[in-house]
Amino acid sequence: MGFSHVTDSILYVGVNDHQVDLFEGQYVVPNGMSYNSYVILDEKIAVMDTVDIHFAQEWLDNVAAVLDGKKPDYLVIQHMEPDHSASIAEFLKVYPDAIVVGNAKTFPMMEQFFGADIAPNREIVANGGSLSLGSHTLTFVFAPMVHWPEVMVSYDCLDKVLFSADGFGKFGALDVEEDWACEARRYYIGIVGKYGGPVQALLKKAAALDIQIICPLHGPVLTENLGYYINLYDIWSSYRVESEGVMIAYASVYGNTKKAATALAEKLQAKGCPKVVLTDLARCDMAEAVEDAFRYGKLVLASITYNGDIFPFMRTFIDHLTERSYQNRTVGMIENGSWAPMAAKVMKTRLEPCKNLTWLDTVTVRSALTAANDAQLDAMADALL
């Protein structure tokens, strides 16, 4: 990709990855990923973060093209996750005199990954500390657990740029056109969603800054309508409802539980529900299912009873919700059991860690739908509107 200008003196030198099939070993990324890095050209030159090791040489070529024979003074490491830090050693082979900038939690991790002799030239910065490059001054704002403990973001007061680490990132390479919110939401909920409190703390710190450009470590540089992106992050990290609608997630073996879930969806649509999402947990992208559960304000779980428990895909789905602090939602349940229906009890127990859930009356199906079940589903639809 080479390089491109963010401002006159800040340049993008990141790379696109279309080789990856599962990001972090679990997230399907049909449009790849970007690993972002930036160079600030000033009296002193700073490189902001590195890239995944598989793209180290491409990245170093981009950096060299921007430097045009100059040498960087600093390598700033905001986040030690390997998709951003794995090329530190390769960088230091080419630029051994560069000073590596991080915080007190950065360097122990760096040594764990690369050995104790990594980065002999280092500068440890404090929360609120700064680094003068000449006209540009970087101020460091610590963002612990967004989403690792060593994370920090950097603010350039000259060009009013926030280098936001994994904040405001998204799935998808930069050479593919796609909607920002969909893949940013799936990225946030899946990877950062557990840490809403720390994200809220960072947003409060960011509110005190005059930010005109956001440079994340994944996804596009954000230069317009920043309020739109910040508002979405505020909604997601405070576990508020983003969109009015109902998600129905089902796990069915012989089709009867699916019929119940489908019947409920049809009733909701007939009654004018603004959005109904019907998801087969055995066949969906689980990350998208989790994303939808957090996006909408109402959730219906429909599962068979399976070995005195719930179907494994439903169990996995609920585990994803509780792991990410699912809360502030209305939840209904449809259970199916031919002789000892237990699914509703199990699902409710597994959701006990979740705060502020409003429960609807459960619909119990015994093998196949009956007229009484149809009436119960109709009542559930009314309660969901």
Image (spheres, rainbow, N blue to C red):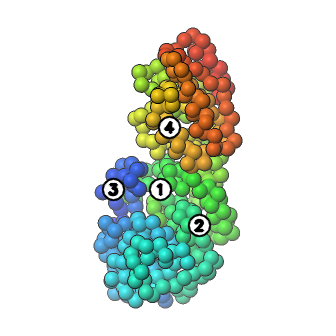
Q: CA distance from mark 2 to mark 4?
A: 30 Å
Label 1 Cα neighbours within 10 Å, binned few <14 / some 14-19 / many ≥20: many
Determine which residue is flagged by label 3: 20
User: Which residue type carries mark 1?
Assistant: Lys
Q: Secondary structure at mark 4?
A: helix
User: Which residue type carries mark 2?
Assistant: Pro
Q: CA distance from mark 1 to mark 4?
A: 27 Å
Q: CA distance from mark 3 to mark 1?
A: 15 Å
Q: Identify the residue shown where x is 45% and y is 87%.
A: 121
- Pointer 4 or 3: first along the chain: 3
Determine which residue is flagged by label 2: 144
Residue 28: image x %, image y %? 39, 48
Determine which residue is flagged by label 4: 315
User: Which residue type carries mark 4?
Assistant: Arg
- Using the image as rendered, state which of residue 366 and residue 185 is in the foreground: 366
Q: Secondary structure at mark 1?
A: loop
Q: Are marks 3 and 1 in contact (CB under 8 Å)?
A: no
Q: Quadrant of the C terminus?
A: top right
Q: Identify the residue shown where x is 33% and y is 71%.
A: 56
- Pointer 2 or 4: first along the chain: 2
Label 4 Cα neighbours within 10 Å, binned few <14 / some 14-19 / many ≥20: some
- Pointer 1 or 4: first along the chain: 1
- Pointer 3 or 2: first along the chain: 3
Residue 255: image x %, image y %? 43, 21
Determine which residue is flagged by label 1: 170
Q: Nearer the viewer, mark 1 or mark 4?
A: 4
Asked if residue 164 shows in the view, the reply is: no
Dividing the picture into quadrants, the one containing residue 140 is bottom right
Q: CA distance from mark 3 to mark 2?
A: 27 Å
